[in-house]
Amino acid sequence: MKEVLFNPNPTNAGALLTIDLGAICANWRALKARVGTVECAAVVKADAYGLGAVKIAPALYGAGCRHFFVAHLTEAIELRPALPNDAAIYVLHGPYPGTEQAFAVHGLVPVLNSLSQVLAWGALARRRGVRLPAILQLDTGMARLGLCTAELEALVANQGALDGIDLKYIMSHLVSAEEHDNAINSMQLARFRTALVRLPKTKASLANSSGIFLGRDYHFDLVRPGAALYGVAPAAGMSNPLRSVIKLRGRVIQTRWIEAGTAVGYSHTWTAPCRSLIATVSVGYADGFIRSLSNKAVASFNGYRLPLVGNISMDTITVDITYVPADQIMEGTLITLVDDLLNVDEIASRAGTIGYEILTSLGSRYLRSYVGD
């Protein structure tokens, strides 16, 4: 499989990040197969979870996806030229006051999260003399975005507020879908169904990545996977049915032997228990290899698991390579920090966070290449 590099000389790079478009598309196809005739969108916000929306979204379009979600208007405007006109781009944050015209000009679909957004979008549609598409979001338990109970009651009482709006979907967002047995899931489902019958008959969307695995009751007409597309496990306590999509390799810039009792790195948080060979690798927290992985992460090389020792610095990490056979790792050698085995979920667990943060923290200094579709 040919690896497409954006730098003609990868030996110049301190670290290489390979993104498998084929695996991302395979994950989307697997999720689509799981929901059958239900539409399957792709959430590509935050630059496709840090992996490059303008590369990933067209690949997913080629796989059959026609619905794409971003968070910000600026993300949508950047993405619009990368996709054919029949691809719908939805903006989860909706239109801030004064931005409604930009949505219409760029052919974007807002998610309306408040009664004020509904009224402003409807007013624009009536001024333009056209029906403008939108999604209406209801808050069923997140207390974050979407019409609250009072706003829903006001909208039910005055459904004329929707005049001029081509309502594509009514949606809500699940709080704890990764926990299958959490009672919040069924509570939100019941609230969502109750609200739907009080509003104009429209297609609906509730399930995120993890919600897909809660079963058909949660699928409605459109599911919205995000992290699962990029290989993050969709449910706690179950094996991950999805493919890992990234490989991260860092370049060794120095090796040195240190004697027993020698401390390594800032604040001397690790001390060599015996004479040790330490490799300094050109990746740090400025590259998204977050500092909470200090003394917890592992790297790999030719089947060897290599502990990260000492605190992570802005630009470097230090790795114990004492037990790798001599002369296998030297200056310029690439060692693996993320792959199918050292996946984002394992790394996140070691860091005390979630795979979403690991992906979206990936920095701009990596030499990025894309393989696959």
Image (tube, rainbow, N blue to C red):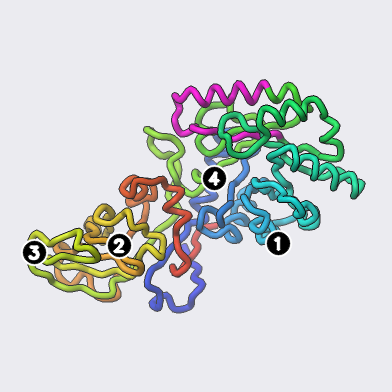
Q: Amino acid at mark 4?
A: Gly
How many tags in the picture? 4
User: Callout 2, which amino acid?
Assistant: Ile
Give the residue pinned by disc 1.
81
Classify mark 3: residues with Cα within 10 Å, few (<14), some (14-19) or many (20+). few
**Counting residues from the N terminus, which is met first, the one under dot 2 or under dot 1?**
1
Q: Residue at x 48, y 67 (%)?
A: 364
Q: Nearer the viewer, mark 4 or mark 2?
A: 2
Give whichever of discs 4 and 1 has the lower sequence position. 1
Q: Residue at x 42, y 75 (%)?
A: 10
**Which quarter of the figure has residue 52?**
bottom right
Name the kind of residue labelled 3 in the image. Gly
Disc 2 to disc 3, C-alpha distance: 20 Å
Based on the picture, tell me whether residue 177 belongs to the magenta stretch. yes
Q: x%, y% of residue 105?
A: 80, 57
Can you identify the residue that label 3 sits on? Answer: 261
Tag on residue 102? none
Q: Nearer the viewer, mark 2 or mark 1?
A: 2
Residue type indicated by callout 1: Pro
Query: In this view of the protein, can residue 323 be seen by the observer?
Result: yes
Number of the label disc, if any, that sits on residue 226: 4
Please name the residue that numbered disc 2 is placed on.
312
Q: Which residues are magenta?
A: 170-194
CA separation in Å, label 2 and label 1: 39 Å
Dot 4 and dot 2 residues touching (CB under 8 Å): no
Along the polypeptide, which appears first: circle 4 or circle 3? 4
Q: Residues within 10 Å of mark 4 (few under 14, many from 20)?
A: many
Quadrant location of the C terminus in the rendered image: bottom right
